[in-house]
Amino acid sequence: MSIHRLVSVIAIATTTFVPIPASAQMPAGWKDFTKLFQSYIDADKIVGASVVAVRAGKETARYDTGLADRSAGVRVDSQTIFHWGSITKSLTAISIMQLRDRGKLSLDDKIVKWVPELHAMHDPYNMMDSITIRMVMSHTAGFQNPTWPYGSDEPWEPFEPTTWNQLVAMMPYQQLVFKPGSRYGYSNPGFIYLARVIEHITGDPWDAYVQKNIFAPLGMDRSYFRDTPYYLASHRSHNYYIRRDSTSPASPKLIDNGADFDPGITSPNGAWNAPVSDLVKYVAFLTNALVPGMTRERYDVVLSRASLQEMWKPGLPMSQGYESSPNEWMGLSFFVLDRNGQRILGHTGSQAGFRSFYYFDPESQAAVIAVFNTANLAAPAATIQRQMNEAALALLKRG
């Protein structure tokens, strides 16, 4: 049996529908969307995935499909822990806004105030001293996209840098790739620099700061970074690559990357691990939807609505590079989408074999959250993926 057929059979055989309270209103078009979602899963040979619809902080529909651990036959379910990749960046950005609101910094402060090592980077525009925290948050600083200056995908290449001194050692061999402030250009290492600001001001490691100031007050007690705590290990999803096999080009190879991996010093741009339920709590906060145990005072302690609205103002258009798409802008670490006059916010994530997205409408308090544990590097089903993404956004359409 081919891998395509095998994975498709596994996914279909292990689709799970989770009961939703009768009071919850399933979004219009959900059943058609899940059919398209499953078609994408099959076409892209994804081992396991989850998607939920949210309204006013509550799950209104859920669809789990496939396996969290293929070799052990563990199914994806409501407890499965996934990796959320670059969605982590919003945690770093909210942390910066918290410190701004507490009078510890200004968004117009220069990044070199806390990261003087950046002076070693080649600066053809002579503008390194002009790059502000705001520019870094909005991906307009001119820093490169990848953390490593190479990416030939050799098996010996380390996954990510693990220590700050490794990044510093590479700075003399990097340069600003465009004039700061002139355009949008997605940058992963920029968020490591933001984390250095947080650590310098607070004295806390970045991950400890986020745990204390975002996860704990929002009750996100199954969220963590890097290695999985022992008591959660049985729920952790593996992640998978589908790669071309030189010995059999017509039959791509499914590779199990295991469960855990270490993003190291790059954690502030992508290290968040959590079940979908913790993302639902996070979206409840972002949409100001009160859930049991929460109060508006608690939400405001995390970040005020005025500061969130500031983060959601559209900046420069995302017309170049990563995630380029029409009618989309970058805010302060949030994607800002316009769909027929409706403002939709969110972000995507991709790291190791995990991929994810979440989108929400703060006015209607509706959201859709999806995550996949497989990256098809051989023949990605790009067309149906775009169709599925647009169908997910359509679920947020106001009636």
Image (tube, helix red, strand yellow):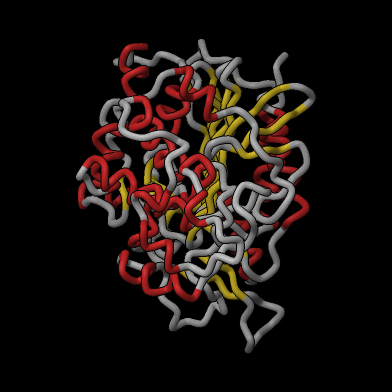
Please name whichever residue, 180 or 354, is drawn nearer the observer in this view of the structure.
Answer: 180
Q: Position of residue 389 (x, y in %)?
A: 69, 41
- Residue at 49% x, 44% y: name it: 132
Q: Position of residue 253 (x, y in %)?
A: 58, 75
Considering only vertical position in the picture, is 117 above or below 218? below
Residue 12 in sight from this viewpoint: no
Residue 272 relative to residue 320: left or right? left
Residue 198 relative to residue 340: left or right? left
Please name whichever residue, 46 or 396, is drawn nearer the observer in this view of the structure.
Answer: 396
How many discs mark residues in the rendered view? Answer: 0
Which picture quadrant has residue 258? bottom left
- Residue at 76% x, 22% y: name it: 341
Please name whichever residue, 29 or 165, is drawn nearer the observer in this view of the structure.
Answer: 165
Which picture quadrant has residue 72? bottom left
Residue placed furthest toward the front: 126
Q: Position of residue 47 (x, y in %)?
A: 54, 57
For the N terminus, give its image quadrant: bottom right
- Residue at 70% x, 17% y: name it: 398
For the C terminus, give its image quadrant: top right
Residue 124 in sight from this viewpoint: yes
Residue 271 relative to residue 379: left or right? left
Q: Position of residue 323 (x, y in %)?
A: 66, 50
Considering only vertical position in the picture, is 259 above or below 77? below
Residue placed furthest toward the bottom: 247
